[in-house]
Image (cartoon, helix red, strand yellow):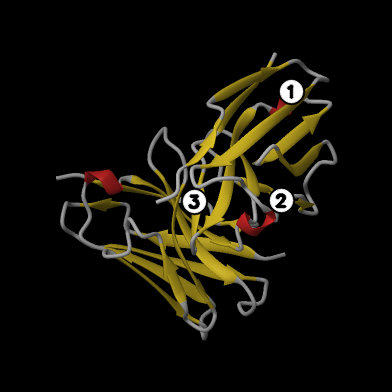
């Protein structure tokens, strides 16, 4: 059964770069779309973007100028970079496979 | 960008039936929006229930069903259980992007 394990820095200052990685265990990396989704505290879900195993990425238009999603097929991992961050980027960030399997979530707090 | 709208809250009695809906600001929701539905309980990651309008994941209880209803995507819970109390989110594919609805808080009492 596929599992997603994610990690990255949990506390950032404004203007810094958010960097998260999601590793895929127990399943194929090809043939799926790999997404990043976030959820501000007490609020709803927001799709950030996705990428396929070939490296073709799609982004939320509202975040596109600040986001990069990349894939490392040799390690079965994909990553998210968001820069520069502000307090509005404080959220739990999730990685997901085709929206059917989700990582455990990482709380990222942006504070000076 | 497209706005996806859900009922903010609904209440249902145990054993009852409830339908949650998901509307698009651009018009009627069709199968081409590939509606997805998720359940989220406090402190947990969302759990996928329905994809592509009406398809269930292997773990989705039989009492959950998805459909298109009156120009909206719909999630119907039949024979509601206390453990179904949760936040429910829909997700639509709109103009090359995925857009979540604001969520429906379902209370069972």
Q: Which residue is found at the position 49% from the left and 61% from the top?
A: B95
Q: Which residue is found at the position 27% from the left and 50% from the top?
A: A11
Mark 1–mark 2 CB contact (< 8 Å): no
* Residue that carries the numbered disc 1 in the rendered image: B82
Q: Position of residue B33 (x, y in %)?
A: 61, 55
Question: Which label lies toward us, 1 or 3?
Answer: 3
C-alpha gap between disc 1 and disc 3: 29 Å
Q: Counting residues from the N terminus, which is met first, the one under dot 1 or under dot 3? A: 1
Disc 3: which chain?
A: B
For the N terminus of chain A, the image quarter is bottom right
The answer to whether residue B50 is seen in the rendering is yes
Taking the image as shown, residue B62 lies to the left or right of residue B70, namely: right
Viewer-side residue, B28 vs A32: B28
* Residue that carries the numbered disc 3 in the rendered image: B99
Secondary structure state at the residue bearing disc 1: helix
C-alpha gap between disc 1 and disc 2: 25 Å
C-alpha gap between disc 2 and disc 3: 15 Å
Task: Classify 10 Å Cα crowding around label 2: few (below 14), some (14-19), many (20 and above).
Answer: many
Q: Position of residue B109 (x, y in %)?
A: 70, 13
Q: Counting residues from the N terminus, which is met first, the one under dot 1 or under dot 2? A: 2
Name the disc covering residue B13, or none.
none
* Residue that carries the numbered disc 2 in the rendered image: B53
Disc 1: which chain?
A: B
């Amino acid at each position: 059964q596929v599992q997603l394990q994610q990690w990255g820095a949990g506390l950032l200052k404004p203007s810094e770069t958010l960097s998260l990685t999601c590793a895929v265990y127990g399943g194929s990396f090809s043939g799926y779309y790999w997404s990043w989704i976030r959820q501000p505290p007490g609020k709803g879900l927001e799709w950030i973007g996705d990428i396929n195993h070939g490296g073709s990425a799609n982004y939320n238009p509202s975040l596109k100028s600040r986001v990069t999603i990349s894939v490392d097929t040799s390690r079965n991992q994909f990553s998210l970079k968001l820069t520069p961050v502000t307090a509005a980027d404080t959220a739990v960030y999730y990685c997901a496979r085709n929206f059917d399997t989700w990582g455990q979530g990482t709380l990222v707090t942006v504070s000076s | 960008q497209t706005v996806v709208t859900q009922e903010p809250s609904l209440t249902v009695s145990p054993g009852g039936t409830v339908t949650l809906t998901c509307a698009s600001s651009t018009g009627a929701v069709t199968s081409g929006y590939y509606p997805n539905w998720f359940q989220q309980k406090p402190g947990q990651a969302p759990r996928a229930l329905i994809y592509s309008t009406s398809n269930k994941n292997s773990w989705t209880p039989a009492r959950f069903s998805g459909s298109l209803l009156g120009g909206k995507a719909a999630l119907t819970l039949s024979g509601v259980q206390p453990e179904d109390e949760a936040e429910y989110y829909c997700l639509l594919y709109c103009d090359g992007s995925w857009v979540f609805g604001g969520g429906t808080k379902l209370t069972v009492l």
